[in-house]
Amino acid sequence: MPPRRKDIDRLLADWPYRQNEVIARLVRAGDGREVLQLRVDMGVLQMEVENRPDGTRPHGADTYYDYLVGQALHDPDFQLTPEQCLDADREFVQYYHRRICWLALREYRRAVRDADHSLRFMDFARDHSPNEEWTLSHEQYRPYVLFHRIQASSLAELEDNGPESAIAELNKGLARFRAMYADEETTERYDDDELVARLNELKESLREHYQLGRTLDERLADAVAAEEYELAAQLRDELAKRTNGR
């Protein structure tokens, strides 16, 4: 009986790498479970589709973030140690790889879920950081993760509920971007943010493609701003009926 092969030459030959492209696929493992694979230049990354992408349970928890939250609950002065910072970084990277795979595969709800995990972990890391340098090393990526989250949630709404819901989701996301920069003295950073511009471009392309004017939530916001309260009440009722009818 010939020895069992341990290389992955055939897999790599059958699934070529393409530079500057996220190449991902969902496959069935030998035990029947669904796993996610990402083709990289020197091989393949395989990830679990639930909880931690590497399939481990750090200290018995679903994710390392969950474990750390449990630790912090028992210590009001909890601060991340250097070792915990390294383990946190590992989880951030794993969730990044899986998030970009979900986006490439148009698994938008799953991309939203993973982006939300990273954003919650970023909040925790900021609140319990050992120093400002480590905080900034993560906060610099917050706009990028938030962009992925808004992009994915709006495209999921487009698939499930149509273009008006997608535009409403984009507007909510843009409000989150504006709030993120709210502590600054000017709106310059928000106005100049390339990711904000890309979200606005997506919104306008949806409006143009589906020939939509001002959406219901935008008309409501306009009515409130103009202090047209009777019209605003009517629009709220219409919006509630539409939401409850889904």
Image (cartoon, rainbow, N blue to C red):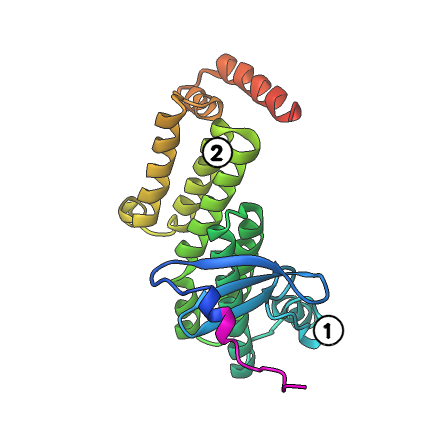
Residue 48 x/y as whole percent: 62, 64
Q: Secondary structure at mark 2?
A: helix
Amino acid at circle 1? Gly
- Position of residue 102 relative to residue 223, above or below, is below
- The answer to whether any part of residue 129 appears in the image is no
Q: Residue at x 55, y 17 (%)?
A: 233
Residue 92 x/y as whole percent: 51, 67
Q: Give the residue at mark 2.
A: 166
Q: Secondary structure at mark 1?
A: helix
Residue 200 x/y as whole percent: 34, 38
Give the prevailing secondary structure in the magenta stretch.
loop
- Position of residue 133 relative to residue 236, above or below, is below
Q: Quadrant of the N terminus?
A: bottom right
Instruction: Report if residue 10 lies within the magenta region.
Output: yes
Amino acid at circle 2? Ala
Q: Give the residue at mark 1.
A: 60
Q: Residue at x 64, y 67 (%)?
A: 63
- Position of residue 84 relative to residue 243, above or below, is below
Q: Residue at x 35, y 26 (%)?
A: 208
Read off the magenta span.
1-11
Dot 1: few (<14), some (14–19), or many (≥20) neighbours within 10 Å? few
